[in-house]
Image (cartoon, rainbow, N blue to C red):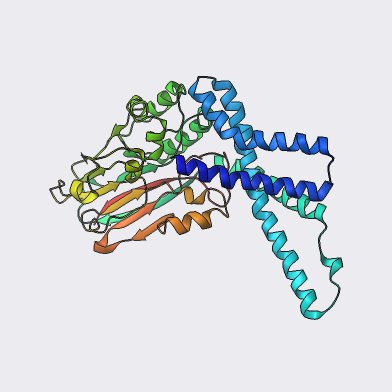
């Protein structure tokens, strides 16, 4: 965790320093203005720490205000940097063309002020769109026919939510929008594939009550993600239970006499000091009866000898990158990034783009989703 924080602040601090250089080149501010700018940039850099500290000590209103300001600033800064790189690449190509043609291309080169204003305008536009897109939840559909589903069971509709991150930002009306979409899907079964909660020390009783209003006939089941452990596993499990979910932590639940749900803890818990997590195969070996088997696992990682022991794996974690172009990086880390992936042994992996947001309440070219899975006989 310490290495992660160090890496984060080095990279995020670098983005702030880059912006400082761009502003200085564009406007040549005086010494006093530069001091004010540096102070504001340091405040932006430290905003995530101030938010978490405010949460931990119960200053919820302050934490919420700073979350909106600090995380929207983070999105603007990251997208400013991305857009700025494109403009710098354009400038490089113009210079290269001038050298190749041995001609003056100064008229085609953007000024230092334009190299700041154009990326800034682009970043603000993308963030404005991304705030609205984060609230526009899509329904992704998946229909699976299987001889393991008996005819008398009929269609079994499962709705998957993932990475909701209930906490300082995802709550109230935001959560109500998510649950309205779930309710419209009329699930027989609701599953959460991790990161249901996000906050530390927040009062989530209202959110738990909102979840309790969803009562599928075959129940609600959840597995842990990494943020359940970040937030405090005991508190996270208390919220999960209060919200009406049955937590599957290496457990198995049989649904409708036709489906075995197998839930495992997040694979990354050993990095947080938690030991003793059994392998997926070890847990799956306890399944019997030839029923359709679904593995609920937060991260879209497939253990080498696990395919063949389940029919469907439901995962999340990647958020589909949440904000393009950073999805290009998450795609390198997680080859199973979002969507459906056939596995050996006839199994299928579905990776959700996630239903909520983490950090900035923004999504750009990675819209949120609930997944509707219809299991059909045949």
In this rendering, the answer to whether 65 lies above or below 96 is: above
Q: Residue furthest bottom?
A: 101
Q: Is residue 116 left or right of residue 348?
A: right
Residue at 78 percent of width and 39 percent of height: 34
Q: Residue furthest top?
A: 58
Pick the front one: 176 or 147: 176
In this rendering, the answer to whether 140 lies above or below 174 is: below
* Quarter of the rendering occupied by the N terminus: top left
In this rendering, the answer to whether 53 lies above or below 19 is: above
Q: Quadrant of residue 246?
A: top left
Pick the front one: 215 or 318: 318
Q: Is residue 125 visible?
A: no
Q: Quadrant of residue 50?
A: top right
Pick the front one: 334 or 274: 274
Residue at 48 percent of width and 24 percent of height: 56
Q: Is residue 46 left or right of residue 216?
A: right
Q: Position of residue 223 (x, y in %)?
A: 32, 39
* Quarter of the rendering occupied by the C terminus: bottom left
Q: Position of residue 284 (x, y in %)?
A: 19, 48
Q: Residue furthest left?
A: 289
Residue at 76 percent of width and 75 percent of height: 97
Q: Position of residue 30 (x, y in %)?
A: 85, 40
Total count of labels: 0
Q: Position of residue 346 (x, y in %)?
A: 26, 62
Q: Is residue 123 left or right of residue 171?
A: right
Q: Is residue 279 visible?
A: yes
């Amino acid at each position: 965790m310490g290495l992660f924080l160090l890496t984060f602040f080095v990279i995020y601090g670098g983005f702030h320093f880059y912006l400082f250089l761009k502003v200085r080149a564009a406007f040549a501010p005086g010494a006093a203005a530069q001091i004010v700018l540096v102070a504001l940039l340091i405040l932006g850099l430290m905003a995530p720490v101030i938010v978490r500290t405010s949460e931990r000590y119960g200053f919820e209103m302050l934490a919420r205000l700073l979350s909106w300001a600090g995380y929207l600033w983070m999105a603007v800064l990251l997208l400013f940097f991305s857009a700025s790189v494109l403009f710098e690449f354009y400038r490089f190509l113009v210079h290269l063309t001038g050298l190749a043609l041995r001609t003056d291309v100064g008229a085609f080169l953007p000024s230092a002020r334009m190299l700041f204003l154009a990326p800034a305008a682009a970043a603000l536009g993308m963030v404005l769109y991304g705030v609205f897109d984060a609230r526009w939840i899509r329904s992704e559909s998946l229909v699976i026919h299987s001889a393991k589903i008996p005819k008398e069971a009929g269609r079994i509709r499962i709705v998957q939510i993932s990475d909701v991150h209930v906490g300082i930002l995802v709550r109230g009306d935001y959560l109500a929008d998510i649950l309205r979409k779930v309710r419209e899907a009329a699930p027989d079964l609701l599953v959460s594939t991790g990161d249901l909660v996000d906050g530390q020390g927040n009062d989530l009783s209202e959110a738990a009550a909102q979840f309790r209003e969803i009562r599928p006939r075959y129940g609600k089941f959840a597995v842990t993600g990494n943020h359940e452990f970040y937030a405090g596993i005991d508190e996270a499990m208390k919220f999960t239970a209060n919200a009406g979910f049955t937590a599957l932590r290496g457990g198995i639940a049989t649904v409708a006499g036709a489906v075995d749900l197998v839930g495992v803890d997040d694979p990354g818990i050993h990095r947080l000091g938690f030991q003793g997590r059994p392998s997926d195969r070890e847990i799956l070996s306890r399944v019997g009866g030839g029923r359709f088997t679904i593995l609920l696992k937060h991260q879209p990682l497939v253990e080498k000898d696990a395919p063949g022991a389940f029919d469907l794996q439901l995962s999340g974690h990647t958020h589909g990158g949440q904000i393009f172009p950073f999805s290009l990086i998450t795609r390198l880390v997680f080859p199973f990034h979002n969507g459906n992936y056939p596995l050996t042994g006839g199994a299928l992996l579905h990776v959700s783009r996630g239903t909520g947001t983490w950090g900035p309440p923004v999504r750009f070219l990675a819209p949120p989703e609930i997944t509707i899975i219809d299991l059909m006989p045949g």
